[in-house]
Image (cartoon, rainbow, N blue to C red):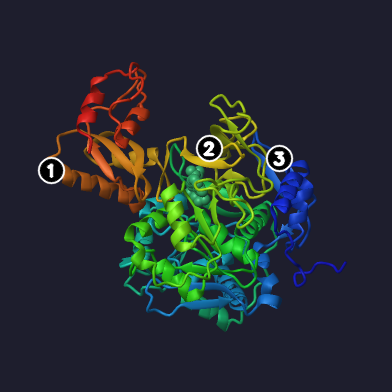
Amino acid sequence: MPTKTIQNLKMNFQIKTIADYNQAYKQSVDQPEAFWADIADNFYWRKKWDKVLNWDFSSPNIKWYEGAKLNITENCLDRHLQDKGNQPAIIWEPNDPEEHHRVLTYTQLHQQVCLFANALKNNGAKKGDRICIYMPMVPELAIAVLACARIGAIHSVVFGGFSAQSIADRINDATCNLVITADGGFRGAKDIPLKNVMDDALVQCPSVKKVIVLTRTRSPISMIKGRDVWWEDEIKKAETLGMHSHQAEEMDAEDELFILYTSGSTGKPKGVVHTCAGYMVYAAYSFQNVFQYQAGDTYFCTADIGWITGHSYIVYGPLAMGATTLMFEGVPTYPDAGRFWDIVDKYKVNVLYTAPTAIRSLMQSGLDFVKDKDLSSLKTLGSVGEPINEEAWNWYNENIGKRNCPIVDTWWQTETGGILISPLAGITPTKPCFATLPLPGIQPILVDEKGEEILGNGVSGNLCIKFPWPGMLRTTYGDHERCRINYFATYPNMYFTGDGCMRDEDGNYRITGRVDDVINVSGHRIGTAEVENAINMFTDVVESAVVGYPHAIKGQGIYAYVILNKQAIDANLTRQDITMTVSRIIGAIAKPDKIQFVTGLPKTRSGKIMRRILRKIAEGETENLGDTSTLLDPSVVEAIKNERV
Ligand code: PRX
């Protein structure tokens, strides 16, 4: 056997048949360490691990590949240079279809990442630093992410739709010392003033010493001497100094790779932490097997890198597999609702991975936008982020896949790092609305309220995972106890997902939605408590309660019941004021769709809001509200029912 060097490594873990899947699944359960050691053998390690897995869910303490040394970017970039140096790594489609697209080959991406890694170092960044990235969907965003990983800095990407207050909360929680942003970004017909928003955030962020600003919209912005520098200047400086190469920092398997903030049912968003080795192995393994990516395919994931889908399935997973990943700056409806199909046609996309919200919105725009587009290159379609309803599944299957492309309905979470339950394209029989079967290594379990396992098929319960997998979160940044309480304390010795789930007669899983106070708006996770806190910041609000309700396009909408301290003179204007306040505090994605002013909320004698009743009323159900006998004042419910908006 020749020794495995970075040049002659071959990825060899593709499942090709259902028999392969069954065999891999069985081995992953019977001998998990041997299974995950074999998979990890396909990667480039500076030093191999001493122990594959060390775990204890009660702390929790989860360690994969302990003792191993690596840098994820050597696996995403350097290892492909010899065989795939001239192959496109990233294809970038701009917001404006008239603007030139860009292609970065693996060689070019490697060069850019090395240069920017040196620019980061020249600006004082070092291993272990936390770096906040707030950028539009341009290739430099992927370059920034990879350059952080290259120098061993921990990136915390914040989605471009979040407000200054949300950015400040995230920067302060992680005490970031450096920020990478852009003057602005283009999204549809809008210019997003990213640097201005960042400037507002930075007023509250004493830890930030440097801000690197990319030019994208070239809109006027403030640049503060000593703190703010231009991306382009820093790249030129690195070039002038001849800093074209960069020796990647050697990282421990369990060193932190990134933080990504996500909402839970209580308090402020938590910083989910992923570490280097396990995340890399799981992102690559799941990418390869779920999408059945073939060499030469063009793969298009429509997510934003600000979310976990973009981290795992635009950047790390595809690049680790040497794939060609397409990044799109814009929105599905600009300049018209045919944009995705234009992109598929233009680049001959083979794999398309998008969200049910996008499918529903494009479906509503009608088939005129699809009919003249050549979609014959498509082989696999993916769905992520929220349950896909049958109508959308069928429309996607018939009009986009032409009944010829398997649809992989991929269930997973920010915390899971990668896809846990999904068909493997063309291998697992699909079933509309079902995420079907767990990937090898994933041991789902359904439990009742008491944590008792619900055995057998044709059953429903709360979805937990009873054994660790390499891509799982390790902690929540700066607050390990919060991680324990949120995910590992509800049911002992299990990871609790927060999702409800049913298992059909054949053992296929169908995710039915959150069972906690988290709502899923257009595939974005929003905590009801967070929205309530933001509404309560409005000067005239006494109290509020927020619930989700079914929304034809977004999946769920936000319905807010609000008590004011005085009668609004102009109710509509007050609604707009409240909406604006929420935009300021969280961001436009958390704006309530409906606001109903009420004089009281249904509470139990102990003062707990009965959300179940509010949810039913928001859904339009006014008759069967269930047991209301524990309410302190049942007349409140009548008033709310009568004034539904
Ligand atoms: O409720 C589930 C839903 O999205 C939640 C995770 O949200 P987030 O961490 O933002 O990650 C989204 C992208 C992975 C889950 O708890 N969800 C995600 N995928 C699906 C889904 N619900 C049903 N079907 C899916 N395929």
What x and y, as percent, mark residue 24?
73, 50
Please tell me which of labels 3 and 1 falls first in the chain: 3
Please tell me which of labels 1 and 2 falls first in the chain: 2
Residues at marks 1 and 2, CA–CA distance in whole angstroms? 43 Å
For marks 1 and 2, give the one nearer the viewer. Answer: 2
Q: Which mark is residue 55?
A: 3
| Identity, as a three-letter code, of the amino acid under mark 1 | Asp
User: What element does badge 2 sit on?
Assistant: strand
Q: Which residue is mark 1?
A: 570
Q: Which mark is residue 288?
A: none
Residue at image position (56%, 30%) is 490
Q: Which residue is mark 2?
A: 501
Residue 88 vs residue 119, the one in the foreground = 88
For label 3, the crowd category at 10 Å Cα-Cα, with few meaning under 14, some 14 to 19 and many 20 or more, is few
Q: Quadrant of the N terminus?
A: bottom right
| Identity, as a three-letter code, of the amino acid under mark 2 | Cys
Q: Which residue ends up furthest to the left in the rendered image? A: 569
What x and y, as percent, mark residue 152?
62, 61
Residues at marks 3 and 1, CA–CA distance in whole angstroms? 58 Å
Q: Quadrant of the C terminus?
A: top left
For label 2, the crowd category at 10 Å Cα-Cα, with few meaning under 14, some 14 to 19 and many 20 or more, is many
Q: Is mark 2 within 8 Å of ligand 1?
A: no
Q: Is residue 224 visible?
A: no
User: What element does badge 1 sit on?
Assistant: loop
Left or right of residue 68, residue 538 in this image = left
Q: Which residue ends up furthest to the right in the rendered image? A: 1
> Looking at the image, do the residues carrying marks 2 and 3 touch, with CB atoms under 8 Å apart?
no
Please tell me which of labels 2 and 3 falls first in the chain: 3
Residue 116 vs residue 382, the one in the foreground = 382
For marks 2 and 3, give the one nearer the viewer. Answer: 2
> Looking at the image, do the residues carrying marks 1 and 2 touch, with CB atoms under 8 Å apart?
no
Residues at marks 2 and 3, CA–CA distance in whole angstroms? 26 Å
